[in-house]
């Protein structure tokens, strides 16, 4: 460390030298002339530079706030000064400072951040939860290597586990928001936040309508982005249209013991797959309405699936959703606008609509598959499959083709499954 009586220290000098060299390199670099592997290697190093910068920015910004060093630069707050220096929005600088404060009580996360093992996004997710209960820190850090989506799921689940259900519902309710503004391109833009119980219903409605819009456009021979269709679905749902209301359902997975007892205890589930834990009080209120599918579990076994869905193979769809509504392709965590795909044997080749032959797949991966990419067998641990480009080792088709359940048998099975629900409906 250099002297602290002058403005410059050894650290300032060293960082100035690095920044000067980076500036010189930025001017010199001709990315267009780089071979692909060189560009990839450069990206690896740029990732390191970014993580180092992020890990240093927080503590430095926090120190600027503590010492009010921003005053001499004519700024009104540390966030304002830091935002100006970094060329970001003040709200982002505020978040960075708040995060650095949280990291004071989370030494493991801070050390991993400084060592370049965590990105700023990962640190934001972990610290937001672990700051309330530092005993969760180690567990959440273990999920950091799984990818952002699994880490976010782990954070949601960990926080729900440690939070009083009523307090959680109250927090969600208080934080609900909806904002709209005019975007620079002349369009109307917005952002919203809803409690999971409300959001899941909205998501089910928009997803269903998006599928309808997709089918209608497909018949016309039009192909646009799913996000565009979802925008149509939102506008139609809110503003009304000739097609009327779409019947939608939300799937709740709940432990039998929790349902009977009336509350959820550690290790038990009461959640909407793809959304996360929800209030059991809300589930109890919804029992008997057509909006809800209840999937009752005892341990690993599904004991009851009660739904009033319109689609005939609804039980198959429900089983798929419960297993995790996510694209089945390795390293793809897409969860929006998934298609149910005939994963093992294509429908065109006589593949049946039976559960062993179905899986969720995202739109881009589905497009690849229809262009000749092939899906490998599911990983026994994760259920994920490798999607290999044409010409690469075509993975073997696994699983024994089973005959599709006949219509009568399916109906009988649904009736059998529905029977115990009357019992569930009597739960106080
Ligand atoms: Zn995918």
Image (tube, grey):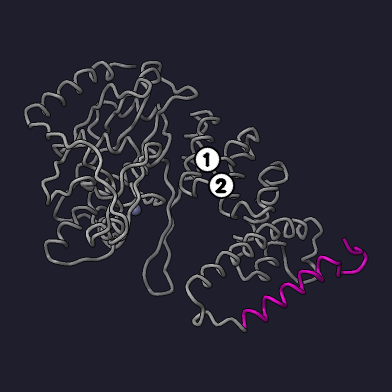
Q: Is residue 2 magenta?
A: yes
Q: Is residue 104 above or below residue 392?
A: above
Write the residue at 15% across / 61% down: 218
Q: Determine whether the residue tagged by mark 2 lies in a helix, strand or loop.
A: helix
| Left or right of 73 in this view: 241 | left
Q: Determine whether the residue tagged by mark 1 lies in a helix, strand or loop.
A: helix
- Estimate the x, y position of residue 192 in percent, counting from the top left: 42, 52
Query: What secondary structure is the stretch in magenta mostly built from?
Result: helix
Q: Which mark is residue 155?
A: 1
Q: Is residue 307 above or below residue 221?
A: above
Label whose residue precedes the other's in the sequence (2 or 1) = 2
User: Which quarter of the picture shows residue 294?
Assistant: top left
Instruction: Locate the C terminus and report the quarter of the image it occupies.
Output: top left
Crowd tier of the residue under label 2, counting other residues whose Cα lies within 10 Å: few below 14, some 14–19, many 20 or above: some
- Estimate the x, y position of residue 322 in percent, counting from the top left: 32, 35
Which region is colored magenta?
A: 1-27
Residues 380 and 230: in front is 380
Residues 39 and 22: in front is 39
Q: Which mark is residue 125?
A: 2
Write the residue at 66% across / 70% down: 84
Give the distance between the C-alpha atoms of the residues marked 2 and 1, in whole angstroms.
7 Å
- Estimate the x, y position of residue 24 in percent, counting from the top left: 67, 81
Write the residue at 30% across / 28% down: 295
- Estimate the x, y position of residue 416 in percent, counting from the top left: 17, 20
């Amino acid at each position: 460390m250099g002297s602290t009586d002058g403005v410059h220290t050894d650290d300032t000098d060293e960082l100035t030298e690095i920044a000067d060299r980076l500036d010189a390199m930025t001017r010199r670099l001709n990315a267009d002339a780089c071979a692909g592997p060189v560009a990839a290697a450069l990206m690896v190093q740029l990732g390191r530079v970014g993580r180092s910068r992020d890990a240093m920015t927080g503590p430095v910004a926090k120190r600027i706030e503590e010492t009010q060093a921003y005053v001499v630069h004519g700024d009104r707050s540390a966030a304002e000064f830091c935002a100006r220096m970094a060329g970001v929005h003040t709200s982002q600088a505020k978040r960075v400072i708040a995060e650095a404060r949280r990291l004071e009580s989370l030494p493991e996360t801070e050390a991993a951040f400084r060592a370049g093992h965590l990105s700023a996004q990962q640190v934001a997710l972990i610290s937001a939860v672990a700051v309330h209960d530092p005993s969760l820190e180690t567990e959440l850090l273990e999920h950091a290597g799984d990818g952002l989506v699994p880490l976010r799921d782990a954070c949601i689940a960990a926080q729900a586990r440690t939070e009083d259900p009523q307090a959680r519902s109250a927090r969600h309710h208080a934080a609900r928001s909806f904002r709209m503004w005019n975007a620079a391109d002349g369009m109307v833009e917005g952002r919203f936040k809803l409690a999971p119980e409300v959001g899941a219903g909205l998501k089910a409605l928009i997803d269903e309508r998006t599928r309808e819009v997709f089918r209608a456009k497909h018949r016309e021979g039009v192909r646009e982005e799913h996000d565009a269709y979802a925008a149509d679905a939102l506008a139609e749902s809110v503003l009304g249209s000739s097609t009327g209301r779409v019947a939608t359902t939300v799937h709740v997975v709940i432990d039998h013991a929790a349902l009977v007892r009336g509350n959820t205890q550690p290790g038990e589930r009461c959640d909407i797959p793809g959304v996360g834990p929800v209030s059991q009080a809300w589930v109890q209120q919804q029992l008997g309405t057509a909006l809800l599918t209840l999937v009752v579990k005892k341990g690993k076994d599904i004991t009851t699936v009660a739904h009033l869905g319109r689609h005939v193979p609804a039980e198959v769809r429900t089983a798929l959703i419960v297993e995790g509504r996510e694209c089945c392709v390795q390293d793809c965590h897409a969860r929006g606008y998934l298609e149910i795909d005939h994963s093992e044997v294509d429908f065109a080749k006589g593949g049946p609509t039976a559960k062993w032959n179905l899986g969720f797949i995202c739109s881009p991966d589905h497009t690849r598959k229809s262009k000749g990419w092939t899906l490998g067998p599911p990983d026994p641990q994760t259920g994920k499959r490798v999607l290999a480009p044409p010409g690469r080792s075509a993975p073997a088709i696994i699983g024994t083709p089973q005959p599709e359940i006949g219509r009568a048998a399916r109906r009988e099975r649904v009736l059998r499954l529905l029977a115990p629900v009357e019992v569930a409906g009597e739960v106080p």
